[in-house]
Amino acid sequence: MAITVVGSVAYDTIETPAGRRERCLGGAATHFSLAASFFTDVRVIAVVGEDFGPRQEAVFKARNIDTRGIEHTAGKSFFWEGSYLENLNEAKTHNTELNVFASFEPKIPEAYRDSEFLFLANIDPVLQKRVRDAMPDVKLVAGDTMNYWIKDHRAALELVLKGLDILLINDTEARMIAGNDNLVQAARAVMALGPKHLVVKHGEYGATLFHCDTPVGELANWRLNLEPKTFRAPALPLENVVDPTGAGDSFAGGFFGYLASQKELTADAFRRAMFYGSTMGSFACERFGTERIAKLTREEIDARFDEFRRLTHLD
Ligand code: AMP
């Protein structure tokens, strides 16, 4: 099953206790597609400026990611600057420049139209909705967002949430959307806005999956048996966290990429997907930006998945 993803393709300036990097390749769609590319075919929709060249394109190409939907236009690419000096679990945003994304009109290449899975990575919810509406035939839609959009673009975001099968957000975002500090109550309130499945990420403490009573709609050939309703996967205790940027998107890429590689969306598949998400998120933290995942191998992924099994196994 191929995944089409829309989201930011960006330059990031990042500061963590391990150091500082200026303008490294980043963006939610970038981190997501690199991680998902280990599991299935990935197609990207985004816009970049004149500062995005063959060296950046090569990072996608090396993972066989379809970049025909990345539009090149006059101006500067999306830019984000953030730090993790006080809290490694949550970025402090210093600067967000939408640049070419401010006037982006997403166009879906003909070759993307048969994608079964759609991921609405973090970007203006108006753009997420436009891409969702332009791909009515997809079978499963997942998405992400962040405080920036929750605070000031609430109405547009609610329209996106209504059409989601799966929402992946971190716990601060879940509490912010719900206006409720209790995780379970917040999850219930977020799901009342639309998503049938909710993954709440807790940074270094793992992630929780909530299913609601209604299964995902018409999915030919997929058996849907989604008990139990709540499941928690840990994060790998890492000795050195170099840069958490992109860990959430890499989690989403591992999670959704793994689901897209499955014939049946069973509860077991969702649970394994949580562990593949955690696996990809843990790699993302080991180097700055995309450095670690861009060079990863399938063998390393399998070995880490086994490490997760050992971490949580109980006789
Ligand atoms: P995360 O996986 O949550 O750490 O996402 C990090 C990525 O999100 C960075 O590479 C940023 O370029 C990107 N990003 C930051 N702010 C925004 C925003 N407001 N909209 C879209 N993407 C963003």
Image: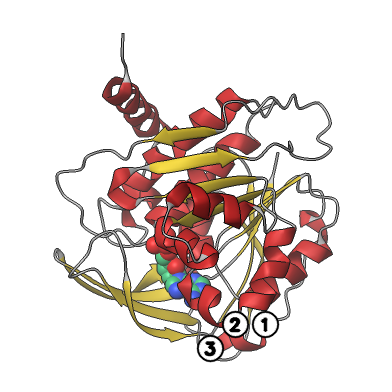
Can you tell which quarter of the image residue 196 is in?
top right
Q: How is the image coloured?
A: secondary structure
Q: Position of residue 305 (x, y in %)?
A: 37, 28
Amino acid at the residue labelled 1: Phe
Residue at 69% over, 24% down: 225
Labelled disc at residue 207: none
Left/right of residue 50 with respect to residue 4 in the rendered view: left
Mark 2 residue crowding within 10 angstroms, few (<14) / some (14–19) / many (20+): many
Q: Do we see residue 294 in this rendering?
A: yes
Q: Quadrant of the N terminus?
A: top right
Mark 2 vs 1: CB contact within 8 A: yes
The amino acid type found where label 3 is placed reads Asn
Tell me the SS state at disc 1.
loop
Name the residue that disc number 1 marks: 104
Q: Name the image quarter holding residue 280.
A: top left
Q: Which residue is mark 3?
A: 99
Residue 76 in picture, x, y percent from top left: 50, 88
Q: Please, is residue 29 above or below residue 65 in the view?
A: below
**Marks 3 and 2, how far apart in space?**
5 Å
Disc 3 crowd rating (10 Å Cα; few below 14, some 14-19, many 20+) is some
Residue at the image point whose x is 25% and y is 50% from the top: 286
Q: Is mark 2 within 8 Å of ligand 1?
A: yes
State the CA–CA distance, disc 3 to disc 1. 9 Å
Q: Is residue 220 above or below residue 144?
A: above
Q: Mark 3 touching mark 2, by CB under 8 A?
A: yes
Looking at the rendered structure, which numbered label has been put on residue 101? 2
Which quarter of the figure has residue 163?
bottom right
